Image (spheres, helix red, strand yellow):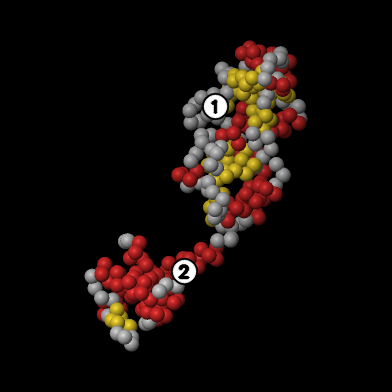
Amino acid sequence: MRLDQLSGIVAFLKVAETKNFTRAAAELGVTPPSLSEAVKGLEERLGIRLLNRTTRSVGLTEAGAAYLARVRPAAEEIQAAGIALAEAKDRPAGTLRLSLPWIAGPLLIEPLMGKFLAAYPDIRLDLVFDDTFVDIAAVGFDAGVRIGELLDADMIALRATGALKNAVLASPAYLAEHGTPLCPADLVDHRCIAYRFSSTRTVSQWDLVEDGREYGFTPDPHFSANTMPLVVEAAAQGVGLAYTTERLASRHLHDRSLVKVLETFCPTLDPLYVYYPSRRLVPPKLRAFLNFIRAEPN
């Protein structure tokens, strides 16, 4: 179907309804000549006359009446769809699809998901955790969550957490048996627990800072897993040293089942951000999520 055929159908429907070209043109906000041309163009494309015109009246031909009977229900459905969208455009509802790295689960989603869904019962959350960067528009996500330094410059971003402080952790029992590392070079003499990426099966690098320079240590792990809570728990049980964000180990740090080592060598990373492609016509479900994050202490 051509675009100009749609305008011809609209013109035909309005003339059939009003039985008057001048009145139909006024209701559509166009001139009578342009309306007449639109109907004429539709008739020419269909190859049949739809309207009988005289200087005093306008009426449907037999073909026009049959055509009207077919297209009017479709036009009414289109109008009803527009009304329904207009009524729903400010109501947060529907499925909110988010792409997130694993770290956003415990740091962002777990603390707020119950309260958010209670506040917006017509919203459903569909969360996909993936450490690789995702083209959210191409894959059909409403928004994504990533560390700030990883975001594309053309994305709209909202800070969702505070800065992320990393730490090397160990249990007091492990340190009592194996000693405490004093500099990054000492790590090669220790048992290390590593996070392993599911997609590539590679071990996550430990980002450290030494003498003002970034230093990347890739452990040869004694224990590895693709879930960070298990990495932290293994450290708490004395398996070895682990590298993670401090907030993920807050419970163990509080009860002293884990302690920090090499603190001066551990960097602070950018916060997590919620990102989305455009400020224009942000869906109510996403707008509600963004406003909820703004209101939550992080």
Residue 22 placement (x, y as % from top left)? 40, 80
Q: Secondary structure at mark 1?
A: loop
The answer to which of 277 and 250 lies nearer the viewer is: 277
The answer to which of 265 and 12 lies nearer the viewer is: 12
Question: Mark 2 belongs to which amino acid?
Answer: Ala
Tell me: 118 left or right of 144: right
Question: Mark 1 belongs to which amino acid?
Answer: Arg
For the residues marked 2 and 1, what is the alpha-carbon distance in whole angstroms? 52 Å
Task: Quickly name the residue at label 2.
Answer: 80
Q: Residue at x 57, y 23 (%)?
A: 205
Image quadrant assignment for residue 58: bottom left
For residue 196, the mark is 1
Tell me: 50 left or right of 296: left
Q: Residue at x 67, y 20 (%)?
A: 212
Tell me: 21 left or right of 206: left
Q: Residue furthest right?
A: 255
Eye-nearest disc, 2 or 1 = 2
Q: Is residue 249 visible?
A: no
Residue 154 placement (x, y as % from top left)? 53, 42
Number of residue marks: 2
Q: Residues within 10 Å of mark 1 (few under 14, many from 20)?
A: many
Residue 189 placement (x, y as % from top left)? 63, 12
**The C terminus lies in quadrant:** top right
Which one is earlier in the sequence, the residue at label 2 or at label 1? 2
